[in-house]
Image (cartoon, rainbow, N blue to C red):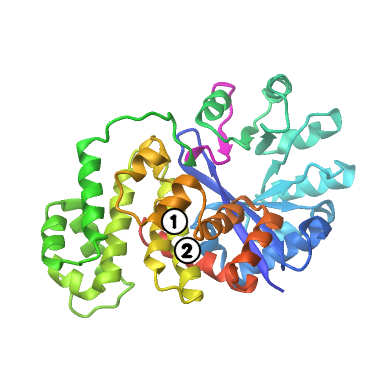
Amino acid sequence: MDVFVARQPIFDRHKHIHAYELLFRTGMSNAFPDLDGETATSSLLSSSFFTIGIEQISGGNKVFINFTEELLLRGTPTMFPSGKIMVEVLEDVTPSEDVIRSCEDLVARGYELALDDFVFTEQWRPLVAIARVIKIDFRLTPIDEIKQIVETVACYKCKLLAEKIETYEEFQQALDMGFVYFQGYFFSRPEILRNKDIPSSQLTLLQLITEVTKAEFEPAALEKLINQDVSVSFKLLKYLNSALFFRVQPISSIRQAIAFLGEKGIRQFVSLIAASKLSENKPTELIRTSIIRARMLELMAEDLNKKNSGDYFMLGLFSLIDAMLDNEMDYLLEQLPLTDSVKAALGRREGEMLPFLQTIELYEAGDWSRFEEVLSDIGIEASRYPAFYFDAVGWADNYQ
């Protein structure tokens, strides 16, 4: 049975990654609403821990995993390392004496609890007393009610997590209310949309991208440009001399690096490093997400034998450029040497490349029904998609 697993970042107050929540479904033949939570969680755990490897999907971070009432009563979380998972108690669990006893046993064994989509009632108080995290949905819960919950649980040791945070304004609002953790796609949005001048340091990086993406590839000109940027040179040589390549003789010059990687490889690498530097003052998850998207789109294009897989790579890499530079996408696209097809997908949200980007956006959000619809239009076998995702996640980690 195919298991589709995506991860959604959870940040701390400094916008650093604290953990990931794993979103999942099994197979593409059953609509998600018809899949009971017990089956879904069991499939996820089997896939994540026994098949894929939790380290690959989590990047070494803790993962939040939903557990149904039945799985809690069975003690299923104890099958997995307490230091790797956060036991997420779903909102539809009945906090009966048996459930409370099971949760107390988990805490005694060193596991941490998170209460999902929390709305306070007296029957939840025993679980609030032992919970590590309380998650409150900012889309479903009115602000006045959120403030009430914050006041009610203030006397307990639990920490508050704000879910569905979509803008930096909402992030700041939750931060001011005392929330410690934040989940949502605010990090992938520009903080302030404004047509400002691009700083000279970022213009230099854009020039580097321009040179590396020219149709006429000039190794000598590229070598000179890379040598002018110490950090790009350092990262390039460090990457090529890492354990990934198992080289006997180290690569010691930019010229050697260009020859070793070839035209496609050097274009990708320099574009990745330049994009990373463009987003230096942003959450690291922003560039990580961009790299994952770039790799996935490239794999999808190659799977369909498209000759312009490099364009798909660039589509993913610059899909969040507006958030990286806090500027309008249309304005930034004027500065970037991208093809018309890539610009149509990013700027006007149209064209033949757009559905490829949409599949990734929907997969990241766990919007499985819409994901299935768009994927079927592209012509990629659904069973291939999880492999693309896990490949891209591992690939992105090598650039961090």
Viewer-proximal residue among 177 and 127: 177
Q: Amino acid at mark 1?
A: Gly
Locate the C terminus and report the quarter of the image it occupies.
Answer: bottom left
Kindly indicate the quadrant of the structure image that contains residue 383: bottom right
* Tag 1 and tag 2, C-beta contact below 8 Å: yes
Q: Residue at x 41, y 41 (%)?
A: 329
Secondary structure category for the residue under label 2? helix
Apparent side of residue 384 relative to residue 257 in the rendered image (left or right): right
**Picture disc at residue 3:** none
Picture coordinates of residue 234, whole percent (x, y): 20, 57
Apparent side of residue 60 relative to residue 66 in the rendered image (left or right): left
Viewer-proximal residue among 219 and 394: 219
Kindly indicate the quadrant of the structure image that contains residue 295: bottom left
Q: How many other residues sit within 10 Å of disc 2, few (<14), some (14-19) or many (≥20)?
A: many
Q: Earlier in the sequence, mark 1 or mark 2?
A: 2
**Residue designated by label 2:** 297
Viewer-proximal residue among 103 and 246: 246
User: Relative to 76, does residue 21 appear above or below in the rendering?
Assistant: above
Q: Residue at x 77, y 58 (%)?
A: 32
Picture coordinates of residue 162, whole percent (x, y): 62, 34
**Picture disc at residue 316:** 1
Q: Which residues are magenta?
A: 176-187
Apparent side of residue 104 relative to residue 154 in the rendered image (left or right): right
Does the stretch in magenta take in 141?
Answer: no
Distance from the alpha carbon under mark 1 to that under mark 2? 6 Å
Picture coordinates of residue 327, whole percent (x, y): 38, 35
Q: Amino acid at mark 2?
A: Leu
Residue 284 visible here = yes
Locate the N terminus and report the quarter of the image it occupies.
Answer: bottom right
